[in-house]
Image (cartoon, grey):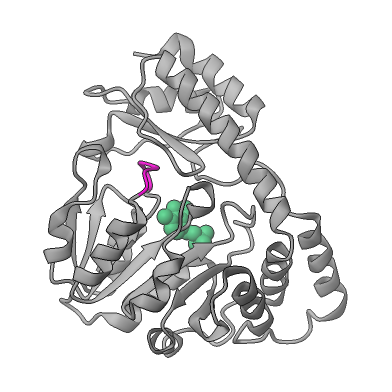
Amino acid sequence: MIKLNTNENPYPPSPRVLEALARVADETLRLYPDPEASALRARAATVYGVPAEWILAGNGSDELIALVLRAAIDPGDRVAFPVPTYSLYEVLVATQGGEAVMVPFGEDFALPAALADARARVTFLCNPNSPSGTLVPRGEVEALARSVAGILVVDEAYVDFARETALPLLGRHDNLIILRTFSKSFSLAGLRVGLAFGHPELLAGLRTVKDSYNLGRPAQAAAEAALADLPAMDANVVRIRVTRARLVHELERLGFRVPPSEANFVLARRPGIDLGALARTLAGRNILVRHFPTPRVRDALRITVGTDAEIDALLAALRPLVP
Ligand SMILES: Cc1ncc(COP(=O)(O)O)c(C=O)c1O
């Protein structure tokens, strides 16, 4: 099976992660984990240049998204985000009884001006966005943080593959929360670790609705070890960016339109043609890519950047099938 549908990293994590996991397994599994993930947060503080009190660790960034909504909204409150985007926002807003205000992205996935006027308690911006892969520049993120009525959550799950992050905006906007994950660039999707960066008062609100032991010992130790070996992550990111450029080039030669991707996936479009059948044919050949049946992107496939061999196999399967 060639799995290019959920944006996992095709390369293994740093060897230091495996050493840390072996140590935990040997020594401390019988003990409860640190509810504050203090060692991990201290390491993250050093790496990202943000005080540890401005960092909260979650069981994947999915948990952090849920904590924001649990802490910040009451039934009926508005939660805004540009669409199409990460589908979990809509699901979790509904779970929490909120009202999702979905504002369509502009042409070429430009930030829609109406987002700032949505009068939402919480606004999500997935940046780089999924499924488009496109990045809203930091200046526009800052303007959005200034103009939204409530909290702005910038979900940077894919930012290590991009050219810039919103982290430098943190100290300037008390309503800003930035989310990161270890599932993509750090190759640790199976362990479930994410980080939230934000003003300590905002994070205090999230703590009130967090399970005490939300992160197990292996996850904490592995994420800390991953942060201690950034060159290993960077090397994987470089390989993925090189493969991404080749994939985009080949897809364009096949007639696809591909918005500029700053993530570890690309959106391959055939304007006006529903690509659901193509995705199913590829799945029949054991190549999984993502098709969304929603109007705006049903003419596209979202393809994770795998290894060069995986991408070669995808392209070989795709060539005779392109509508
Ligand atoms: C935009 C976005 N945010 C968050 C996540 C979830 O990340 P995690 O594995 O840290 O829960 C994903 C996973 O695909 C994602 O695409």
Extreme-right residue of the structure: 26
| Percent coordinates x, y for residue 46 in the rendering | 64, 74
Please give the name of the residue rendered at 28% of the width and 60% of the height, measured from the top-left corner. Answer: 90
Please give the name of the residue rendered at 54% of the width and 71% of the height, measured from the top-left corner. Answer: 59
Q: Is residue 212 left or right of residue 88?
A: right
Residue 134: say if magenta. Answer: yes
User: Looking at the figure, which quarter contains the N terminus?
Assistant: top right
| Percent coordinates x, y for residue 121 in the rendering | 21, 76
Residue 314: say if magenta. Answer: no
Which region is colored magenta?
130-135
| Percent coordinates x, y for residue 199 in the rendering | 41, 83
Q: Is residue 190 left or right of residue 112?
A: right
Extreme-top residue of the structure: 320
Task: Classify 169 as above or below 3.
Answer: below
Quick check: can you spot residue 13? no
Please give the name of the residue rendered at 37% of the width and 48% of the height, measured from the top-left corner. Answer: 135
Question: Residue 150 lies in what quarter of the image?
Answer: bottom left
User: Looking at the figure, which quarter contains the C terminus?
Assistant: top left
Quick check: can you spot residue 160? yes
